[in-house]
Image: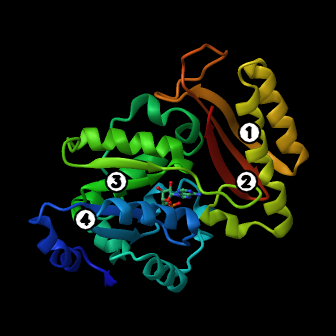
Amino acid sequence: MVICKTAAILENTLKKYYTNNINIGFVPTMGALHNGHIALIEESKQQCAITVASIFVNPTQFNDKNDFEKYPITIENDIFLLEKAGCDIIFLPSVNEIYSDGIDNLKHYELSYLEEILEGKYRKGHFQGVCNVVERLLLMVKPTILFLGQKDYQQCMVVSKLVELMNWQNKLKLVIVPTIREENGLAMSSRNRRLTEEERTKAAAIYNNLLYMKNNFERLPFNGLIKRAEEELLKNGFLKIDYISICNAQNLQPIAEYKEGVKLVVLIAAFIGEVRLIDNLLL
Ligand code: AMP
């Protein structure tokens, strides 16, 4: 496994592969790796001759300074896990390497509705930061397949839009990997490291409610399902709920009632202690 800290070294390491018409898989991460990230690496290994993972805690996508400052960093363990998973190349850039022009004059991406709802509404500017870093990383890695986790459902849609805005639809394929969970159903997340044992146990209420909604959305009214989920989360120690929303899975428009043939997704964002967790389930 090769570790590249600059785009120049990365380019030099990858250049022999660009000409050979082979798949280069790319898994961008912010580190503090867990089995969810490793599932993406494994999927890339299945589909690509070369797998590149990046670890970069992107300062421009944090709307909350406290969240950025407390973001877990476990770089030695990350390298160990990536090596064990058979990752070929790690890209480990500094902030200056990614933002050589500074972070004050970022590009603006036309995401319209996609950044006005759900995560976009509660984390102002978050998806602009995501697009800025992902475009820069894509231009540096030049992969053929990009692997993303369904855990960040809206982010997958934003990145798909970014690929369109970059006009890369014909040279980059997106693969969405299903969410990997703890035994109790809690979606794996780097932020779970900040939960106490008790909070981890209680946080399973998110998945239990997603499942309840999946099992009942055809027979119970949506507003009742959402109200029940809100009450259950608050009963289980969640302090604040940003949203529980049933949406059209294609475009994230909120849907008020069941209609056959419309593919739905339910999405939740809520705080337990001071940690904000998100999750979703296709219905
Ligand atoms: P992050 O390090 O949180 O930026 O995540 C890097 C990538 O891993 C993103 O595409 C995430 O959607 C994905 N990911 C994070 N958690 C999970 C999970 N539990 N299961 C599957 N993919 C995940």
Q: Which residue is mark 3?
A: 132
Amino acid type indicated by mark 3: Asn
**Image x and y of residue 177, in percent:** 48, 51
Q: Residues within 10 Å of mark 3 (few under 14, many from 20)?
A: many
Q: Amino acid at mark 1?
A: Leu
Badge 2 is on which residue? 185
Q: Which mark lies nearer to you, 4 or 1? A: 1
Above or below for 252 versus 121: above
Q: CA distance from mark 3 to mark 1?
A: 34 Å
x 58%, y 52%: residue: 179
Label 3 residue SS = helix
Q: Residue at x 82, y 49 (%)?
A: 238
Question: Which badge, 4 or 1, is on the more N-terminal residue?
Answer: 4
Report whether 164 appears left or right of 183: left
Disc 4/disc 1 C-alpha distance (Å): 38 Å
What residue lies at 33% left-to-right and 59% top-to-bottom?
A: 47
Q: Please state the total of marks drawn on the protein image.
A: 4
| In-front residue for pair 272/160 | 160
Between tags 3 and 4, which lies in front? 4
CB contact under 8 Å: marks 3 and 4? no
Q: Secondary structure at mark 1?
A: helix
